[in-house]
């Protein structure tokens, strides 16, 4: 008879050592510093599932506040339903024991590398940053345990169209200036504006990463280390000199072209303050950034969009992308 039991681990280095069990994407050594920073910020713990004393499953647990328990990196080595169900029960048991009111996941911190959600059927399964891979049996068993859908996310995917926004006849950008920070230090002088606009005007359904203000510096460093300065961008309204929009692309460190250079990215976020919406600023941000991406031979991309964010869904269609992957994030109320 098979004997299942769990072991709670709290040492961050030990969690990191076992993290690969929880995800099919590679845990590369150059990402360790970013992973450990998130572990420390969010007070990470992990549950190991043991079968006859041998590790057969893993889940990461973490939180920003004591009401909401997040989980990520949920994986059973052989994807066996009974073991998946057993580990789900252990998450619920842990949450109740520690007086959490809600559970949400999977969220794989740092999300700028490992993403979130369980992959839905008919999704592309090639390796790409922010795109975890799993068979659909996981979410089906979570549903049976009482978890419900929190977010359905579509990933637009394809060749990045190179768009010159200043040549688009339907928009007039004479009063707007697009610009990028010169380097990480320059961005530090602007990050309070970036955080304010993103936190206040990004749709709530797009805000999956817990405590974005807590991990912001680390995630920005990641972009500058593996990407380029053009991956963070701002729009200034010239008449008032006010920054009215901003956004970001993310690098994809898992893919290179035949010359050994990164050739793809994630079209990640953009936000516009309400008084400057419907003026084409999303297209200005995308287009001006796409021109620079092409200069660096970055010509393939993925754009995650919540299914209820109509403006971004329409932009994806306008750019000619197709939905390559779909993810679901789940929640459970205790």
Image (spheres, grey):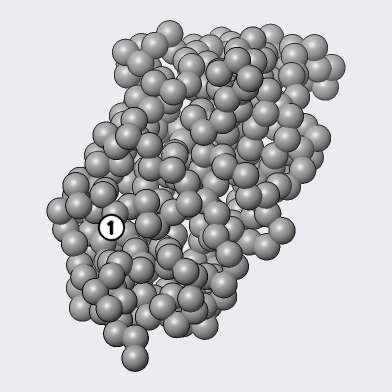
Q: Is residue 132 above or below residue 268?
A: below
Residue 168, position in %: x, y? 81, 17
**In terms of image quadrants, where is residue 85?**
bottom left
Residue at 68% of width from left, 23% of height from top? 299
Q: Point out residue 75 in the picture as x, y percentages from the top left corner.
A: 43, 64
The reply, left or right, for residue 257 in relation to residue 43 is: right
Query: On the rendered structure, is 233 left or right of 301?
Result: left
Badge 1 is on which residue? 62
Residue occupying the point 34% across, 64% down? 58
Which residue does the image show at 41% across and 48% down from the upper left? 209
**Residue farthest toward the left in the current orientation of the protein:** 11
Residue 203, given in percent of the width and then of the height, sits at 54, 46
Q: Is residue 84 visible?
A: yes
Residue 6 appears anywhere in the view: no
Name the quadrant containing residue 260.
top right
Q: Position of residue 113 (x, y in %)?
A: 44, 39
Q: Residues within 10 Å of mark 1 (few under 14, many from 20)?
A: many
166 relative position to 199: left or right = right
Q: What kind of element bears circle 1?
A: strand
The quarter of the image holding the C terminus is: bottom left
């Amino acid at each position: 008879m098979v004997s299942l039991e769990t072991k709670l681990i709290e040492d961050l280095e030990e969690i990191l050592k076992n993290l690969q069990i929880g995800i099919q994407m590679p845990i590369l050594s150059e990402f360790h510093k970013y992973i450990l920073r998130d572990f420390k910020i969010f007070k990470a713990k992990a549950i190991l599932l043991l079968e006859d004393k041998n590790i057969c499953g893993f889940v990461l647990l973490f939180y920003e506040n004591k009401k909401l328990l997040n989980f990520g990196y949920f994986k059973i080595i052989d994807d066996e339903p009974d073991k998946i169900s057993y580990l789900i029960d252990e998450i619920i048991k842990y949450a109740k024991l520690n007086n959490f009111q809600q559970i949400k996941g999977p969220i794989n911190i740092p999300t700028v590398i490992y993403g979130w959600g369980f992959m839905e059927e008919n999704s592309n399964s090639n390796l790409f940053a922010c795109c975890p891979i799993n068979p659909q049996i996981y979410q089906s068993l979570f549903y049976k345990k009482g978890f419900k859908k929190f977010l359905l996310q579509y990933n637009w995917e394809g060749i990045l169209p190179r768009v010159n926004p200043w040549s688009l006849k339907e928009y007039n950008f004479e009063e707007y200036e697009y610009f990028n920070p010169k380097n990480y230090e320059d961005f530090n002088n602007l990050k309070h504006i970036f955080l304010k606009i993103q936190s206040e005007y990004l749709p709530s359904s797009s805000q999956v990463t817990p405590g974005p203000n807590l991990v912001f510096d680390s995630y920005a460093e990641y972009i500058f280390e593996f990407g380029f300065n053009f991956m963070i961008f701002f729009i200034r309204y010239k008449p008032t000199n006010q920054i009215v929009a901003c956004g970001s692309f993310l690098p994809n460190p898992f893919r290179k072209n035949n010359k050994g250079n990164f050739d793809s990215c994630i079209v990640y976020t953009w936000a516009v303050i309400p008084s400057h919406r419907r003026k084409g600023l999303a297209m200005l941000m995308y287009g001006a950034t796409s021109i620079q991406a092409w200069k660096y031979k970055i010509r393939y991309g993925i754009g995650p969009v919540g299914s209820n964010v109509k403006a971004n869904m329409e932009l994806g269609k306008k750019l000619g992308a197709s939905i390559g992957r779909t993810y679901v994030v789940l929640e459970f109320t205790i």
